[in-house]
Amino acid sequence: MNDTFIERRRYPRADVDYKAVLETASGDKVNLRTQNISGSGIYFYTDKRLTEFTEVSLTVSLPAVGKMKELSFCCPGVIVRVEGGADISDWPFAAAIHFAGIDDSHRAAICAYVDAVLAERKKESR
């Protein structure tokens, strides 16, 4: 058996923990708490069950890290996965959003943020 793990994701991801709000196409606002983010999407906990393939508008707020300043922007997305029974009792559901139609500059900012978070954590672990 081969224990070598091959990463198939196109963009690396970093664990992040902050609260945010997304808005569905029908105007519903949903509170969420992020778990991780990458250049392709975000995984989060929520207090409301969502439906797969729902189009949403998400305000992405990236806190300052390293030399990077805080950054906030809106981007469209699609819910691609919904799970029940999240392990955080106040946030009983988990879901994933794929960034759909995100500006290249915003994707680049997210990727730079993820790289900075991973570099900071690597530095801290030394």
Image (cartoon, grey):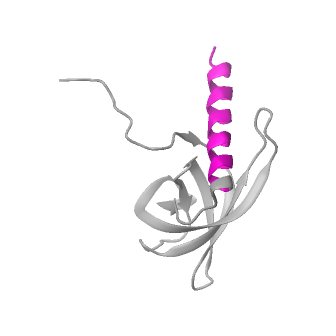
Compared to 119, does 88 lie above or below? below
Please, what is the dominant secondary structure of the magenta stretch?
Answer: helix
Instruction: Determine the residue located farthest toward the bottom in the rendered image.
Output: 26
Q: Which residues are magenta?
A: 106-126
Drawn side of residue 95 relative to residue 114, left or right = left
Residue 78 in sight from this viewpoint: yes
Which residue shows up at 64% across the image and 60% down it?
A: 103
Query: Which residue is found at the position 46% from the left and 55% from the top?
Result: 86
Residue 93 appears in the rendering: no
In the rendered image, residue 121 lying in the magenta stretch gets the answer: yes
The front one of 79 and 84 is 79
Q: Quadrant of the N terminus?
A: top left
Q: Is residue 117 above or below residue 28?
A: above
Report the side of 126 relative to 70 (left or right). Answer: left
Closer-to-camera residue (47/124): 124
| Direction from residue 14 to residue 51 in the image, left or right | left
Image coords of residue 112 (percent x, y) = 66, 40
